[in-house]
Amino acid sequence: MSQSPDGTAPAKPAAGRAGLRKELPEHFKAYKHVWVFIEYEHGVVHPVSFELLGEGRKLADALGVELAGVLLGGERDALIAAARTCFQYGADLAYLVANPVLTHYRNETYTAAMTRLVDTYKPEVLLLGATTLGRDLAGSVATTLLTGLTADCTALAIDGERSLAATRPTFGGSLLCTIHTLNYRPQMATIRPRVMAMPAPQAGRTGRIVEHALDMPEEDVVTKVLRFLPDRESNKAQLAYADIVVAGGLGLKSEANVGLVKALADALGGEYGGSRPLVQKGWIGGDRQIGQTGKTIRPKLYIAAGISGAIQHRVGVEGADLIVAINTDANAPIFDFAHVGIVADAVELLPALTGAFRRHLSINRIAS
Amino acid sequence: MTEDRFDAIVVGAGPSGNAAAYTMAKSGLKVLQLERGEYPGSKNVQGAILYADAVEKVIPDFREDAPLERHVIEQRLWMMNEASHTGIHYRSDDFNEERPNRYTIIRAQFDKWFSRKVREAGAVVLCETTVTELVRGGRGEVIGVRTDRDGGCVLADVVVLADGVNGLVGQRAGLRTELEPDTVALAVKEMHFLPREVIDARFNLKGDEGAVIEAMGTVTDGMVGTAFLYTNRESISVGIGCLVSDFAQSQTTPYQLLERFKRHPSIGPLLAGSEVKEYAAHLIPEGGYKAVPEICGDGWVVVGDSGHFVNAIHREGSNLAMTTGRIAGETVARLKRSGAACTRANLAEYRASLDASFVMKDLRKYKDVPRFLDRTRQVFGLYPHLINQASQTWFRVDGVDKRTKEREILASFRKSRSLGGLIGDAIKLARAWR
Amino acid sequence: MHIVVCIKQVPDSAQIRVHPVTNTIMRQGVPTIINPFDLFALEEALRLRDRFGGEVTVLTMGPPMAEDSLRKALTFGADRAVLLTDRCFAGSDTLATSYALAAAICKIGETWGVPDFVFTGKQTIDGDTAQVGPGIAKRLGLNQLTYVSRIVEVEPSSGRLLVQRRAEGGVQELESRLPALITMLEGTNDIRRGSLDDALRAARAEIVTWNAAAAGIADLSPCGLRGSPTVVKSVFAPKPRAEKAEQIATAGTAPDEVADAAVAEIFRRLPGLEAELLS
Ligand SMILES: Cc1cc2nc3c(=O)[nH]c(=O)nc-3n(C[C@H](O)[C@H](O)[C@H](O)COP(=O)(O)OP(=O)(O)OC[C@H]3O[C@@H](n4cnc5c(N)ncnc54)[C@H](O)[C@@H]3O)c2cc1C
Ligand SMILES: Cc1cc2nc3c(=O)[nH]c(=O)nc-3n(C[C@H](O)[C@H](O)[C@H](O)COP(=O)(O)OP(=O)(O)OC[C@H]3O[C@@H](n4cnc5c(N)ncnc54)[C@H](O)[C@@H]3O)c2cc1C
Ligand SMILES: Nc1ncnc2c1ncn2[C@@H]1O[C@H](COP(=O)(O)O)[C@@H](O)[C@H]1O
């Protein structure tokens, strides 16, 4: 990702330089296989890791190489169990580093473990989820290895020259750019959660486990994790994974009307969220923001009430199966990408919708 | 209060304030300029016409690095009714001269550039700092300003009020009265972005050539006002403005008028496919000569829009702003050099210089026009309508002989307005114009 | 205590337009701002300075006009500003950017004292990578603390540091040591408004301007385009969806009727949904 001081570079394809491609340096030729960093914390694998295994599988097949998951953690048995799950999601093998210093995520220990694995086993592609953990780790690993890292990708492919083509939004989503890491290995990328489809697990699929030791005593580690305070509202993190999301925008007009959005979400057993201005006004929490700088969602049903549909919002919701938009302005940009449009006052329609769903479902519940 | 003391404080970093600050700083004065916007021009998002002459007198070689959009080679004046316009176009290759006379600019960029020049000339420029009031000395003379920042008083020998049309600082200090709704127009404006090639093709332009349309007629719904369209490099500024007092009486909003103007069949195709950004509303002082307030006193002078220096008929504002700013700056610098205090009596030199310049001469020439327009509403509805109808009758070939057509046209005028009325309007206009 | 804050001047991306034909950015009239995320870092740094004494140095790598953002940082109360500007930095990706900034921070350390803290924003709104902070930390061997929501304790004498950082699904409380690099989470504070004296000082301040040589960068190969492993191969606009939303008729219809029609349409388009909701 170009980061030129004047910020213009992403807009200008560096065609001249891309054409300059030299032969891959000899020492990089040994780099083979596609790796996915498996984000394993508090006993669970972050779903983004499975999404990446699904995507990594395709890349590995295109390259004709193996797909590996990388698992770092404190308890060997738990890692092995997680590795087995990874096989079901498409991994051929798993690299496993178990050491008490890896019990909780810390940049220092994870960077050390990760870079040593890369130096030893030499992958050509390394993918991480663009979560807080993944981004914290990826930056350090790439800088340690002095290789390229493409952040926050939304599409991956292998081009004719066996090079990873990583596509990501730029300029707030107004444009997309495709970035390559030429002449350096591994080619690293972080990918947003919920951008890649979740693959279906294949029961009975297995793979090899390669264990690697990390020689790192706790005394040598500077940073200590004192506590982990899980989010009180445990469903906060669920927004990205909810099947039904109802969101509001400035068209709601007042903080009180956010309640109408919540009520509809509750009636549908879904989650609620909103556009960025609502966060800025303090009407909803930051982790409920949907869009470019908020969450990407991929629900079955997305209902947007009083949201204009700016590009920064659009990029976060386009993966939804069905987008229903309520807006008073028939020309609002949201109607350009919603599937169903309702030109109406959201403040009136939201309660009506909540009522209609309730009615409909209770009638059918009685009927069935 | 800060320890710092300045020779002059300039309130506002629009064209008038910048011209004043630049002129004084160049003459070696210690100048502080205060602007409430995030950066100079941030409150002036619109595109506009820049008159080279007034800038040249402040910064002779401005063409070298000022952000100019296009130089104007074509001027269109349109009389519009619902479906048509009849107009005068003046286009000349002579305007493709080495030192073009008029440019379109984007204020946000131009003001920023101008402000950089002010800083390079040695003035201290503070943005995001609002002047809340004037500080007075024992004799009531102005000795400085108070700002909205902590520790916010600064003193100076003279305060130049370049705070724009609202002139709130002067008003609060009782130096001038409130704005009268019938002396200010409310203008709304939008920027329509289009690729450069599209603009070139639609207006028949090449290189940095630009075109300007100024329009009046039924688009203002009978209100006193005009609409305009300027071509920038990759955008078109479109706007419309009418007297605040007229808006107050009518049921229409400025936004509705602008929408109507943009949809007019003569305008719509010029804007088709554009992306709209930056909707902005701003006041324009249009009272002319008679609305100019007291412009100097003990320790203060007023320049630019704050002093109502706008020639509404010719749509000139920034040039009067820069000229008044420059002349005020020169006056203060001269007083300073000769060791004279900035008293009302000494600053009267400023008023005298203005009287001798085009600023006051033009304002005086048109001093009766605002009243004429106010009393002769036909100009904004009936006449454009009649003229367009006449054009149509004249240009439509339908087997009717030309003499009959002439008669039809005359009759249509007569029917709508008595001969006396027509002649009367013409005389009134001629008088106001004198 | 010496604190370095890295800020970047960015185009206000809310106002960016894309040329419909050539797909290039139309930057005309797009104002530049300090990357909003960096203001949270700057304010946190200023608070630390106010508490423990010392100085805040703001640093940016960018074109000469990036000076505006540094001057603005000074009006907020930063003590010193360094502009790192050189043609050889053009086209830097995050790896090359962190190389140049790390070198400049070393030079800042030699000149005005080794920093105890380096702050960066969480991410920029143009690059949007969140990689430059970690890159600098790695290159300078600083303890890396990203997404910090609160600095709980600092003991300058012992170098002990206690912070809370946003992690997946919760907040981590970490104990670490100075010198550290912190990337601040947004919404954690509000940037202050400098006093009139701050503003006057900022307007007159000399911005320290370094090219590569002045920043002590002898080896230029890791800089700019040459030192950037990533290459932008193509830029294109997102594909517009072919068809627009199908509108549910609302004219003259009561909200309840519209809602019923909408519910029916939703269940028609998502056949499995109704059963799921009922179960
Ligand atoms: C760097 C950057 C990142 C950003 N990231 C994000 C992001 O992640 N997520 C995000 O959402 N935004 C983001 N934005 C902001 C984005 O550009 C838009 O400003 C924002 O999405 C607009 O929010 P909105 O639709 O709620 O408000 P508006 O654009 O003001 O739209 C309100 C809409 O409500 C309609 N309306 C009004 N009244 C009613 C009513 N009674 N009933 C129904 N409809 C009504 C209006 O017609 C209008 O379409 C970002 C911007 C920048 C610059
Ligand atoms: C829609 C529109 C189109 C126009 N088109 C043209 C045109 O094409 N050509 C032309 O020549 N003229 C045009 N004009 C007129 C022209 O814009 C003005 O005459 C000119 O800007 C006046 O300059 P000024 O410096 O007096 O005031 P302004 O440009 O208004 O500047 C005043 C400055 O003072 C600042 N300020 C105000 N109060 C305070 C305070 N208390 N403390 C600190 N700062 C303060 C403001 O933020 C502002 O930046 C147009 C006007 C409008 C509204
Ligand atoms: N050119 C630069 N100059 C100074 N700081 C920068 C620059 N680029 C990035 N940064 C800092 O690094 C952070 C992360 O940037 P990014 O990796 O681009 O998202 C920003 O918030 C800044 O604090």
Image: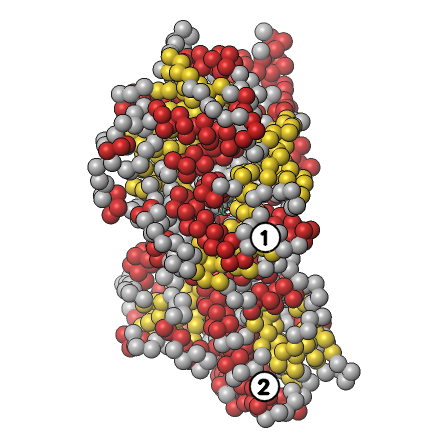
Image coordinates of residue A30 in percent, x first then y, are 27, 27
* Crowd band around label 2 with a 10 angstrom C-alpha radius: few (<14), some (14–19), many (20+): many
- Specify whether B188 is left or right of C160: left
Task: Identify the residue under disc 1.
Answer: C2
**Disc 1 secondary structure class:** strand
Q: Position of residue B24 (x, y in %)?
A: 54, 81
What amino acid is labelled 2 in the image? Val
Does any atom of ligand 2 lie closer than 8 Å to the CB of label 2?
no
| Chain on which label 2 sits | B
Q: Can residue B426 be seen in this view?
A: yes
From the image, which quarter does the C terminus of chain A lie in? top right
Q: Which of the four quarters of the rendered structure image does ligand 2 lie in? A: bottom right
**Is residue C182 shown left or right of residue A210?**
right
Position of B210 relative to A256 (above/below):
below
Helix, strand or loop status at disc 2: helix
The quadrant the N terminus of chain A occupies is top left
2 vs 1, front mark: 1
Residue B36 locus on image (x, y percent): 60, 64
Q: Which chain carries label 1?
A: C
Is residue C15 visible from the viewing direction of this image?
no
Query: Circle 2 is placed at which residue position?
Result: B332
Which amino acid type is marked by label 1?
His
At horizontal 34% and vertical 41% (from top left) the residue drawn is: C230
When asked about the image quadrant of residue A356, the answer is top right
